[in-house]
Image: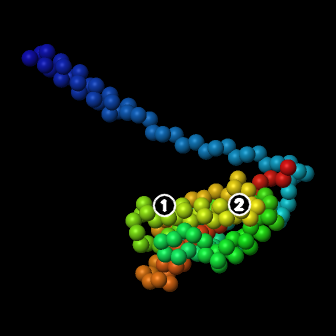
Amino acid sequence: MTGRLGTLTYGVMFFAFLALTGCPPPVATKPEAPAAPPAAVAKPAASRPAPASSSLEAARRDQAPAPSPLKDIYFNYDKYDLKTEARETLKANANWLKTNASARVEIEGHADERGTNEYNLALGAKRAQAARDYLATLGISKERLSTISYGEELPVCKEQNEECWQKNRRGRFVIISARPAS
């Protein structure tokens, strides 16, 4: 009987030790901010395009995305090929990118709510990639262009009708950074 009592006592002590010590909570560390360049070398802020907020950042703030000098393009239902109007918009966007050679852009692919989440994420990715590929044919380096798909997750319009769904089938262009001048 004392053998069982001793084993039970050690078992309770072991579990009490685990419960009291446990694993320490994860420590969040903030990356150190890069040092500001010397004032004599700093480029005036007015000559750099200001980064726009992504659709996701705007949604987190419960706001509309910030306006951008780059215009959105729109797609037909269940399609990722570029319409004539989208090609014209992309030409204007390419001209802006050529004028602002240090700007980097993230192309967001969006879809309307019809279809599965997985399908719409894939469709959004194809839409963003189609825009990226066309901009590359216009002379914009692919290194300056990244893509992301939000599928149906970040609609600009939430009504269930064709006019609203058309607004959600889009490619959006977000200025994510400007490279420092060399």
Above or below for 128 versus 23: below
Q: Is residue 30 left or right of residue 45?
A: left
Picture quarter containing residue 172?
A: bottom right
Depth check: 42 or 150 in front? 150
Look at discs 1 and 2 and give the one toward the viewer.
2
- Residue found at x 64% / y 75%: 86
Depth check: 20 or 107 in front? 107
Picture quarter containing residue 147?
A: bottom right
Q: Is residue 155 left or right of residue 89?
A: left
Label 2: element kind: helix
Q: Position of residue 173 (x, y in %)?
A: 65, 67
- Residue found at x 47% / y 83%: 162
Numbered tag placed on residue 122 in the rendering: 1
Q: Position of residue 134 (x, y in %)?
A: 67, 65
Q: Amino acid at mark 1?
A: Ala
Depth check: 85 or 173 in front? 85
Calculate the distance from the C-alpha at mark 1 to the C-alpha at mark 2.
Answer: 21 Å
Q: Amino acid at mark 2?
A: Ala
Q: Is residue 58 left or right of residue 180?
A: left
- Residue found at x 61% / y 45%: 30
- Residue found at x 64% / y 57%: 146
Report which residue position mark 2 lands on.
136
Specify the farthest residue to the top: 3
Which image quadrant: the N terminus?
Answer: top left
